[in-house]
Amino acid sequence: MREETLRMERVTYRENGVTQLENFSMSIRAGEILGLMPVNRHGISALIKLLRQNLPLHYGYVYYHEKMVNHWRFSDSGTNRISIIQNKSCLAEGLTVADNIFVLRPGFRKRLMQPKILKQQLQPFLMDIDMDIDADAYIEELSPFKRFVVELLKAVVAGNYLVVLDDISSFISDVELQKLHRIIRHYADQGMSFLYVAPHYEEVKRICDRTAVMQNGQIIKYFMFSEHIPDTYMYRWTKGFDRRVSEQISKKTVHPDTEEPAFRAENLCYGEVKDLSFAVAPGECLVLQDLDNRILPDLLAVLSGGKRADLGKMWICSEEFKQKPDRRIAVIQEVPVQTMLFPNLSYLDNLCFTLDHRFHDVWLRNKIKKSLRQEYAGLLGEEVFDLRVEELSHKQKYDLIYMRILVQNPKVVFCVQPFKRAEVAIRIHVWELLERFLDKGIGVVILAVNLADSLALADRLIRVGRGRRMEEYGREDFGNLPVDAPWLYLYQSREKQD
């Protein structure tokens, strides 16, 4: 029988009086890849904190490498040798790959560092997983995929028994994800354990030995890799999306080529963007998938007017885009509740933030803001206007951001991975918010690395590799995509019916 790397028994953990984990039990064996599917994100952050550090428990026991490290009677607040890999890298910028892997690891006591020796020590690890990464490269020069591999190598060199992977598919492409799965399986075969947190069963079934379903801070069900999961069981959480995707497929909206695009780019070149052309019609949803996770920062810099393209032209409707800030183009950043709200401003001021191009005296005349409050109180709720931004719920924050864009009334909206790190209920709500743009005739371009839920709303998909347009799929062709994306089976079953 394999030894256990981690075991949590009946753990109840509270933060500021709120129960984050309740009667939580989970075990991971040596060499196992355990999938964790959260129906909502409640308790995920708390779980990761507890794995990293032995914080005081209300009740329960935690064992790591078959040794009790935390229990409800006493917590020493010590740290565990567990690596956490998330979207935000834990690597130190300004240092090389070799420095991060060897010098910053616990137990390194040499006063004089010899880069040549560190480089030689790294080569066997890279050869073992068939990776080519320059040991002298600085962390900020690496792609997200290579940074991920470096973090994984750092865990291997440090001798950590468990690695937690939190929603990694949201920041690396499908092709890179396959490479990572191969590396993860390689280390699992050598005895390392992994906790693989992902929102979709299509993802965890590709790599995990078992899958645990988590809801409201509790594990409610385990599935074995070889076990068939009843469709009705998964339908409990996905039925909202299933129904909406089916409705979207049935619409079969046609945007004729003769229709004037809401936005068009031709032969665009800037940074990692190489000769990229695309167009989106009014009321159309286009997904641009960045297969290499390279072009998004450079493309957004040009679209927002912060940088001028080296080559190529863009048009908003029939007018050439002057490549300077233009309110006819809106950008919704990834995880916008963290990047697009201003806590020092009131709710109403946040809502009006991009309205000054329509009403130049919006900040001088309270009459305009008062009118706006009356108009949207029925949709947003009267109570939210008197709340501070920090007091808003997750759903209310998304409402505020997307309604701000709707009030701005742009011709096209560029959404950067709009479903990233959003729980099931929020994903469905984001869908509804994006549909408002489409119903109003606003073109929507979803910028995605991994398709995930983006495909569910799309009319077209353009896949971009090495900064260039690689291939295009219409909605009727989604079933032929060479990926295992969520909701893809609905397009495939539709094709069989036709």
Image: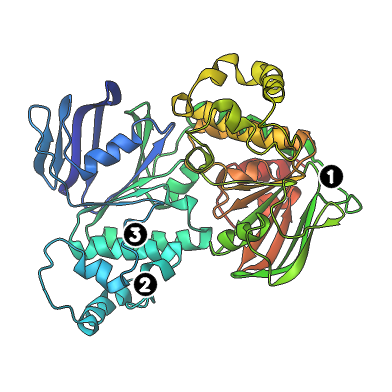
SS at mark 1? loop
What's the distance in space between the residues labelled 3 and 2, CA to CA? 24 Å
Foreground tag (1 vs 3): 1
Residue 254's tag is 1
SS at mark 2? loop
Foreground tag (2 vs 1): 2
Residue 184's tag is 3
Q: Amino acid at mark 1?
A: Val
Foreground tag (3 vs 2): 2
Q: Does 64 appear above or below 91?
A: above
**Residue marked by disc 2:** 138
- Mark 2 vs 1, N-terminal side: 2
Q: Amino acid at mark 3?
A: Ile
SS at mark 3? helix
Residue 271's tag is none
- Mark 3 vs 2, N-terminal side: 2
Q: Nearer the viewer, residue 441 or 175?
A: 441
Q: Nearer the viewer, residue 496 or 10?
A: 10
Q: Does 119 appear above or below 419?
A: below
Q: Is residue 393 left or right of residue 300?
A: left
Task: For label 2, count other residues whose C-alpha is less than 10 Å away and answer few (under 14), some (14-19) or many (20+).
Answer: some
Residue found at the far bottom of this picture: 116
Q: Amino acid at mark 2?
A: Tyr
Image point 71% across, 33% down: which residue? Answer: 407
> In this orientation, does residue 488 appear?
no
Location of residue 59 in the rendering, given as x and y in whole percent from the top left corner:
16, 24
